[in-house]
Image: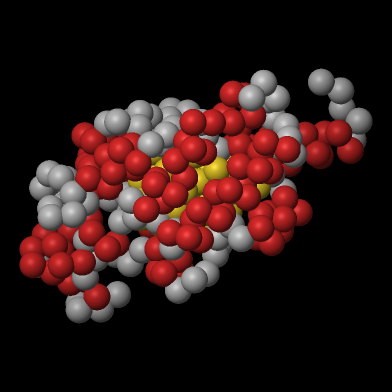
Amino acid sequence: MTRDEKLRLRPNRAKEVLREGGVIFSSSVRLPEPALCEILGLAGFDFVLIDGEHGAIDAASIEALVLGCHAGDTVPVFRVLRPHDPEAVMHALDLGVQGVLVPHCRTPDDALALKQAALYPPLGKRGFGPGRGMRWGRVPTAEYFRTVNESVLLLALIEDPEALDHLDEIAAVGLDVLWLGTGDLSLAWGVPGERNDPRILDAAERLVAACRRQGVAAGFPAVDAEHAKWALEQGFRAIGYGGAEQYVMKTARTFLDHVAKPV
């Protein structure tokens, strides 16, 4: 890295790919082990989702996992625990994450709340207190504020049936990705884990259509490569694939199953 490069914010490659009309891929971590983020980045994922909703993640863990993402040259994105927690959004961004995902985005107001929490005025209401994002003062203040709002990746989970009645309005708020939450939708409809339920497939089609109309990317959680290929064919432009901990279990069981070790 040259001296001039240090004067700029860390690039958000995932957001740049979306701007260029491309597809981004992600995976997640729930345990506070930075090397997992590094490994996922080196594997080639565009961003790593640091799961603060379901994982064992505190403030110190966020910072360490961000550094793991840096080591793997990938974009750190934080999944907050609560959809209406602007302080958690601000805090994670100040610790160096380059994107935020909120769960249970049901209305345009929910999407707007994320946007306002993550962006500085005049586009939002984020309080000032950057550290790592500003390269600890190495980026001049004027340059930081000129570019920072455009460098934050904003994602929202569409995982409640009532959200499907507001897709166009939610997409019109101007987030980067609306992510289909097939798990919670299937639970809400009484078919847990049934990703091929007609209502899930209909929700996927409706989400992609609304995102296209509003110029937003649609995201999808794929369970395997064939599932991901299907999602790409439908028009999804952000694909998630499991988590690091899941890979360990899957690979371990595949080996043990092949050598006939019972559990």
Position of 16 compared to 165: left or right? left
Residue 33's x, y, as percent? 46, 39
Residue 209 in which image quadrant? bottom right
What residue is rendered at 38% in x and 29% in y?
A: 81
Residue 243's x, y, as percent? 58, 42
Position of 253 compared to 146: left or right? right
What residue is rendered at 86% in x and 33% in y?
A: 257
How are the colours assigned in the image?
secondary structure
Please, is residue 9 above or below residue 206 in the view? below
Residue 105's x, y, as percent? 41, 36
What residue is rendered at 51% in x and 61% in y?
A: 212
Residue in the foreground of this view, choosing between 75 and 109 = 109
Residue 213's x, y, as percent? 48, 60
Q: Is residue 234 visible?
A: yes
What residue is rendered at 77% in x and 34% in y?
A: 253
Question: Where is the N terminus found, in terms of image quarters?
Answer: bottom left
Question: Where is the C terminus found, in terms of image quarters?
Answer: top right
Position of 95 compared to 195: left or right? left
Residue 3 in which image quadrant? bottom left
Q: Is residue 52 visible?
A: no
Q: How many discs mark residues in the rendered view?
A: 0
